[in-house]
Structure formats: C-alpha cells, structure tokens
Amino acid sequence: MQHKRKLFIITGMSGAGKSQALKMFGDLGFYCVDNLPMALFAQFADYVKTHPELTNIALGVDVREGERLKELPALLKQNTQKDFATTVIFLDASEECLIRRFSETKHKHPIHKKLAAAIAHEHKLLAPLRVAANKVIDTTDLNLGELKEKIAALLELTKEGEMQISVVSFGFKNGIPKDTDLVMDVRFLPNPYYVPSLKTKTGLDQAVQDYILSFDQTREFSARFTDLIKYLIPLYIKEGKSYLTIAMGCTGGKHRSVFMAHQLAETLRQQGLSASEFHRDIGL
C-alpha cells in the first residue's frame, strides 16, 4: 500500500511566527511554498502528484489571500483526501504580543489599517482556518528554540535514526570547514606523520589505525567523545535539528582526524544511526 504524502498548511496571525515555522520545515527537508494563491491550489496538487520525490510538502498561507481564505477548508477536502495526509497548523499569539513584535521589527501589517484594527480584522478573516486547524500553537511566550521543539514533536521527530549526521575530517592548516555544528581538535593524539613508514599513508590505512589505537589516550578519548555525541543527538532532535555536522581536525588532515572521523562514523552506523563521512584534505 502506497503511503500518502505529508502536506502541512502553515497559517496564522501575522507576527505569530509563520515565516519562521515555514523555514523550519524547509530545514527539515520539506518542499516549501509560501503564499500559494488559492486559485492555483488544485494545479499545485496535480503537480505534486506527478513528482513522486515530493513526499513532504509545506505550504504557507496567510491573510494576503484576503477573502479567498474561506475557500481553503473546502479546497483541502476536495484535493487532498485521497493523496495527502494533511495537517493544518495555526500559529497565534496575544494581541499585546503581536503589537509588540510589529513595533520592534518596524514591519508593516499586510492589512493596511492601524495596527490594532488590522489585527482585529485579521482575526476575523482567519477564524475559519483556526477552526479547521489540526494544531494551534500559541507563540506568545515561545522563543525560536521552543517553537522548533514543538514542530519537531508535531512531526514526531523522536527517532535518532531520522537525524542525518555528517562526520568530516580536515587539517587546521587548511582552515576549519564551514557550516559545522561541532569541531573537535585531535592534535593532542600521537602523530603518525613522524613515523617514516606511516608518513605517506592515511588514516584509512590499517597500519596508521593500529599505531593511533596503540595509545591509551586514543582509546579513552574515542570512548568519551562517542558517548558525548550519543548523549547530544536526542537533545538536538528535541530542539528540532535534523542535520548534524561534526568536524574533526588535526594538523594536515591526513592521519589522526581521518581515522577518528572514520571510527566515529562507523560506530554511529553500527548503532543504527544515519552517519556519513567525508575526508576533506586527505588527498592534498
């Protein structure tokens, strides 16, 4: 039996965090479209059906659609019952909070009225969507991290195997890789570079691995660092993170960092986690 595609409609009050929520869905690998016109909804549904790779979709819908918003519940019923597992998320916040956020950001409300009147009008326009929502999230007292956590819980991102982990080795002499979450300096480990028979080999060669592992400090560090990563993974998932990049560096990026990155990735894979490895400077 073919599984239905997941379709999330992200809507709610202006200033309540819809744009941030949609960005979070994008970070989680969803195909995201913001402010899709209601008139194109049926065509968009047909487009998705012809692209099997689009299994997770998130649409941002807000007050910019005006009176046409009242059509959305019927459109969802007509076009998604058979092909999509649809969830409507409505983001809300107190009037005081919305006024404060607009004042702090200097953004204009999409309804061109005085702010309090615009918020009241928006509440009225969005009332049918709020009623139709599967989940209402009040962001009045939430920071971005807490909003991520709520969305992660909503998506049931609680399995460690769902996180994509990348382990990268590198040489400090060539600079730290960009877009890394954790950087570990392993230059304190004994260096095979100074062993003539190992100098031209890499951390993927058995002789180099045997040399590095022959030291007590290597084995102790490996066990402690692996335990730390295993401890952190469920905490990152709870925070809403779906990708984790761990960079391990030595001087040249050929021996110690390569072996330690390889060993960590192998250990994580053996425990059922999705871990890939990349050795940036091994061929330099």
Image (cartoon, rainbow, N blue to C red):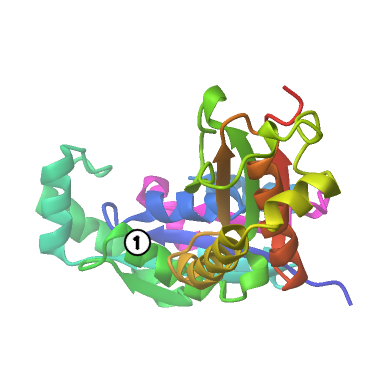
Describe residue 103's horizontal placement relative to residue 44 as left or right.
left
Instruction: Based on the picture, tell me whether residue 209 belongs to the magenta stretch.
Output: no
Q: Is residue 192 above or below residue 228?
A: above
> Whole-percent x and y of residue 275?
70, 57
Task: Give 236 or 90, whichever is nearer the viewer.
Answer: 236
**Amino acid, disc 1:** Gly
- Above-or-below relation of 146 to 277: below
| Image quadrant assignment for residue 215 | bottom right
Q: Which residues are magenta?
A: 48-71
User: Was residue 69 drawn as part of the magenta stretch in this picture?
Assistant: yes
Say left or right for 77 vs 24. Answer: right
Q: Quadrant of the C terminus?
A: top right
Q: Which residue is under mark 1?
A: 145
Label 1: few (<14), some (14–19) or many (≥20) C-alpha neighbours in 10 Å: few
- Describe residue 283's horizontal placement relative to residue 221 as left or right: right
Residue sitting at 48 percent across and 75 percent down?
A: 153
x, y percent for residue 6:
66, 66
Residue found at the very far right of the displayed protein: 1
Residue 126 visible from this viewpoint: no
Horizontal and vertical percent position of residue 4:
76, 70
Q: Quadrant of residue 57?
A: bottom right
In the displayed structure, would residue 82 be above or below residue 72? below
Q: Quadrant of the N terminus?
A: bottom right
Where disc 1 sits, the SS reads: helix
Residue 173: x %, y % from top left: 54, 24
Q: Is residue 63 visible?
A: yes
Front residue of 85 and 273? 273
Residue drawn at 38 percent across, 71 percent down: 130
Against 153, is 245 above or below?
above
Residue placed at 22% from the left, 43% from the top? 109
